[in-house]
Amino acid sequence: MLKHAIAPARFFSQVPNEIIRHPRLSAEAVRLLTWQLSLPDDVNQPLSETAKRAGIRKTAFGRAKAELIAEGYVHEWRRQGPAGRWKTTQLVSNVPLSAEEAAEVRDRGSRPTVEGPTAEEPAVGEPEGRSVGRHPENTEENTSNPPSQPSTVPPPLVERAGLIVASVSHRDRRLRLTGRDVIQLAPLAGEWLLRGATVQEIREALTDGLPDRVHSPAALIHNRLTRKMPDLPPFATSTPAAQPLRSCDGGCDRVFRPLGDETRCRDCRQEAAEGRRSVTRGGDGTAVRPIRPASVPASAF
C-alpha cells in the first residue's frame, strides 16, 4: 500500500484518529461529527442542517446522532425560555464527555478548548484547570467493523436468530438496526436458542419495558441479550464415546458398531425376533444358511 499526503496550508481540521477509526461509529456518524468539528467557531449550525449539507438522509441522520450521543461526542438539552418557547442547545466535542462534563462546558459557555501550545509566549493570568473530557476507551486497533468473536452456535441457529432480531427491529421503530448490527447480534441471540429459549421469549426480552427514546438500539439489544441470557440446561452436554467396530455373531459376516452390549447386527436381531431366520448345523458343526427357492411366476405352470 503506497500513500502520498501533503500537509494542507489552510482550511484543515485536526480530528483524532480515535474518531476516524472508532469501532462503534458508522460512516455517517463519523462524517457528521468531523463536518461539525470543521466548522469555524462563529458558525452556529445545528446537527440537522449539517446532515443536509453532508448529504446524510433523515433515517441515517437519526442513527448517526444516536451513536454520537451514546458515545459521548454529542449532548443536547431542551429548555423553555421566558416567553414560553422551547430552545435546544447542542454540544459537539472531539472527545467523549460525560453528562456532568458536558453540563460544565455548557454552563461555562466556553468554546471548545484545544490543549497544547497555542502561542509563543505564555498568556498573562492565573493557570486554568485542564479541559474536561477524556480519550475514548476500547478503541485500540480500530477498524470500520468491530472484530467478530468466535461463535460456538451452529450456523442454522445463528441464521434463525438473525431473522428474529431483524423482525424485532422492523416491528418497533425504537429498535431499528442496520444489517451490520443484525449480523453482530445474531450469534448472541443464537445462544438463547441453543439454551432452549423460544422465539416469543427472545422477543419479549428485547421489547418489554422499553424507554420512550432509545439512543442506541444495537447497544440496548446487546445489553439485554447478555444480561438476560437464560441458564444452561441441566442435562449434560457431553456425548458418550462411540463403541469400537466388531463382527456380527449372527453368521452374516458383517461388521457393525454396537450402541450397547449387543453382539449381532440390526438385521440379524430383527430376523431372530420375527422367527424368520433358521440356522442348521452341518457335519462340521458350522452354521449353514438354507438357500431359499426363487419365486416362479404362476404363468410358468
Image (spheres, rainbow, N blue to C red):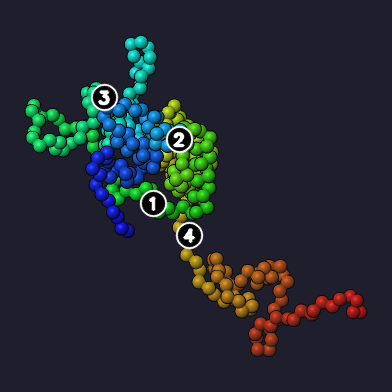
Question: Picture coordinates of residue 56 (x, y %)?
Answer: 42, 36
Disc with the residue nearer the chain's start (4 vs 1): 1
- Do residues under tags 3 and 2 come within 8 Å of each other at their CB atoms? no
Kindly identify the residue that appears in the image at 37 percent across and 30 percent down.
47
| Quadrant location of the C terminus in the rendered image | bottom right
Q: Nearer the viewer, mark 4 or mark 3?
A: 3
Element marked by disc 1: loop
Q: How many marks?
A: 4
Q: Which residue is mark 1?
A: 149
Instruction: Work out how far the residue at label 3 is from the one at label 2, CA to CA, in angstroms.
Output: 28 Å
Q: Secondary structure at mark 4?
A: loop
Secondary structure of the residue carrying numbered label 2: loop
Residue under label 2, please give it: 57
Which kind of residue does numbered mark 2 sit on? Arg
The residue tagged 4 is: 239
Q: Earlier in the sequence, mark 2 or mark 1?
A: 2
Q: Are marks 4 and 1 in contact (CB under 8 Å)?
A: no
Q: Residues within 10 Å of mark 3 (few under 14, many from 20)?
A: some
Cα separation, mark 3 vs mark 1, equals: 39 Å
Is the residue under label 3 in contact with that under label 4 (CB below 8 Å)? no
For the residues labelled 2 and 4, the Cα–Cα distance comes to 53 Å
Alpha carbon distance from label 2 to label 1: 31 Å
Q: Position of residue 105 (x, y in %)?
A: 24, 27
Hey, what amino acid is under mark 1?
Answer: Gln
Residue with the mark numbered 3:
106
CB atoms of marks 2 and 1 within 8 Å: no
